[in-house]
Amino acid sequence: FILSSNGCICNVGTYYNHTSFECSQCMTGCANCTNITSCNSCSYPYVLYEDFCIMPCLERRFLDKSTMTCYQCPNGCESCNSTSFCLACVLGFLQVNQRCALGCEEGEYYDNITKACYLCPYNCNSCLSSTVCSQCEEGYELVNNTCIPSCPQNYIKNINSTCISCQVKNCSICQEGGTCVKCLKNFQLVDGKCQNICGYDDCKGCLNSTFCTKCHLGYFTS
């Protein structure tokens, strides 16, 4: 007992037992209680939980209230309230559908508002949002953040995005406006046109501009 102006009171961590008429010890970790089963405040580092004093869980762990046991949070989770619900993620992880992941799957993008991954637009391999594509699938090209079908070889797009044939004869790759940038084999680019390096259009292979070794179908060397 401790003598006070109000008489004798029990020490900190004890309570007056009306059965034994003496001060009895509170439960472990309890600083102030009315009986052995009901605590009002706890001693450090214990925390109060439903009239009980419990040790707080370590970092990145959570308390299972059904078993009063601390369990490890999922991988990448800074804090959680169950094995399937993350409240915050460690640095370098994204919170995706209540879990922590290093990032979205290929072909998906992350929405900071909903904290979820979504599929990129059709024919888009990678994107920043549902409307901004950064890389297209094979056979498509990126135009104004959107994937549109690519033109076949030796075709270009007109102002209506329609594929039209390159007008330069023997050109393998041409750019907008019909300008040739690469010629077919055995042809060389001269002033925007493709000229046969063999010197003859009917010659398919040669050693130089005057000696033909192979002709196109219907022609023969002489």
Image (cartoon, rainbow, N blue to C red):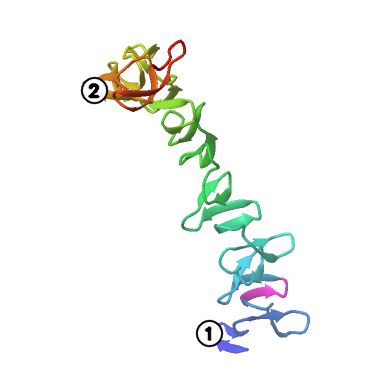
Which residue sits at x=56%, y=75%? 45
Which residue sits at x=74%, y=63%? 67
- Most common SS among magenta residues: strand
Query: In the rendered image, which quarter is residue 132 located in?
Result: top left
Disc 2 is placed on an element classified as: strand
Disc 1 is placed on an element classified as: loop
Give whichever of 195, 89 is nearer the camera. 195
Q: Amino acid at mark 2?
A: Val
Residue 60 is marked as none
Does residue 22 lie above or below 207 as drawn? Answer: below
| Residue 97 image offset from top left, x and y in percent | 58, 44
Q: Which residues are magenta?
A: 31-37
> Tag 1 or tag 2, which sits nearer the N-term?
1
Does residue 181 lie above or below 25 as drawn? Answer: above
- Can residue 90 be seen here? The reply is yes
Quadrant housing the N terminus = bottom right
**In this image, 127 relative to 180: left or right?**
right
Q: Amino acid at mark 1?
A: Ser
Other-residue count near label 2 (Cα within 10 Å), few / some / many at <14 / 14–19 / ≥20? few
Give the residue at mark 2. 190
Give whichever of 218, 24 is nearer the camera. 218
Residue 5 is marked as 1
**In this image, 15 relative to 133: left or right?**
right
Give the residue furthest to the left: 191
- Can residue 183 be seen here? The reply is no
Quadrant housing the C terminus = top left
Give the residue furthest to the front: 222
